[in-house]
Image: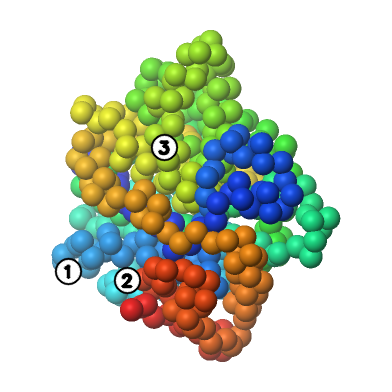
Amino acid sequence: MDTVPVGIEAMNIYGGSTCIDVPGLMAHRGLDTSKSAELMVHQKTVALPFEDPVTFGVNAAKPLVDALSEAERDRIEMLVTCTESGLDFGKSLSSYLHHYLGLNRNCRLFEVKNACYAGTAGLQTAVDFIRSRTSPGAKALVIATDVSRHAVPDDAEAITMDWAFMEPTSGAGAAAVLVGEDARVLHLDAGAYGSYGYEVMDTCRPTPAGEVGDADLGLMSYLDCCEQTFLAYRRRVPQAHYRDTFGYLTFHTPFGGMVKGAHRTMMRKFAKAPRAQIEADFQERVAPGLRYARYTGNMMGGSVFASLAATIAHGSFDEPRRIGCFSYGSGCCAEFYSGVATAQGSELLRELDIEQALRERNVLTTEAYDQVLRDSSAVAFGTRNVELDPVGYAKELGAVHGAPGLVLERISEFHREYGWAA
């Protein structure tokens, strides 16, 4: 057991400045809009050309860093970026984030890539560092940040089934998690986890701007890993029961319907529950964690943290409650772990009002959305030189709130240069 409550001290979710309504996008692409309800995604984040994994990550983490005293900021001794949207084959995103967050230079900076599991990999690495007490009182900052940029098709026939499946749900966003010895948001259960992984070609990014996959294979792998990670967790925590041990359950969320199917399968296998009981249990223990995903789509590495943050902010924590977390990354690796949240953590996250920020974003027309997809080629992976006008571009799109926080201003000899929007 921990001698100190190691875990999450603070966290934030950032869903960008702009989004598009998913049912409208599906109609624009000629897809079956009757299936939009099954996705349980109302809107998805759209990254504008001047937004990238660096801006998303900094804008997610800055409120947490700004809330610290100078002495506390100087104790951040590890910064882990977790992404499948890297901007360079060698240079880590963490170097950019470290600079624009103004952190102490005596800090480990590195990046983790493992599809949507990367955020959990970064979290567990940070927790182990803090728990080891090799530097008592140190903190670690874990930032999961991803951007999905699709190429606009020439015509409706150019859309493959896999592309058509992924575009309405593939979003963007970042989750920032501060890890330390004052786990006010979530105290991670020491030694309580189950890992499971194997090679599978369910979804991947074979090119910097291309995403492909097999939707059916991805679903089967997700369900398999959900079951097997829980079995592995139970071998470490024999008394664990899927229905009775956890006050809430949070999931990596490609889209809400996938989570609902996974929960239904788990309740049938491990609780032998009838349909009505499964639906009631879903609404009570799982649905609170899907609130942010309805506005962002799949945030990839930060998805499980978005589910966790929504659960803690919108759940009932009059008494401490244990939360079970399932994290999955294509390819694949997965983990089931747990922690305890209290009313203090719930209050801290409610003060951030993450959902209100998501509701207030600019909503693009489908025509403007297609224009963004075309214009994003100007900042594609490997771009050497480009000048951007973030504020002017936002106004041209009709983005009434303008450009937010940190924005990409130029790329000069491959070096990305950012500035703070007025």
Marks 3 and 1: which is nearer the front? Answer: 3
| Of 264 and 225, the residue lying toward us | 264
In primary-sequence order, the first of circles 3 and 1 is: 1
**Mark 3 vs mark 1, CA separation in Å:** 33 Å
Disc 1 secondary structure class: helix
**Marks 2/3: CA–CA distance:** 28 Å
Q: Earlier in the sequence, mark 2 or mark 3?
A: 2
The residue located at (36%, 71%) in the rendering is 405
Report the amino acid beneath label 1: Glu
- The percent coordinates of residue 258 (x first, y second) are 59, 35
Task: Look at the numbered disc 2 and give the secondary structure of its residue.
Answer: helix
Q: Residues within 10 Å of mark 2 (few under 14, many from 20)?
A: some
**Crowding at mark 3 (Cα within 10 Å: few <14, some 14-19, many 20+):** many
Residue 70 circle label: 1
Amino acid, disc 2? Leu
Quadrant that contains the N terminus: top left
The residue positioned 31% from the left and 65% from the top of the image is: 62
Packing grade of label 1 (10 A; few <14, some 14-19, many >=20) is few
| Numbered badge on residue 10 | none
Q: In the rendered image, which residue does mark 3 sit on?
A: 289
Spot occupied by residue 93 in the image (x, y as percentages of width and height): 47, 69
Residue at label 2?
101
Question: In what quadrant of the picture does the C terminus appear?
Answer: bottom left
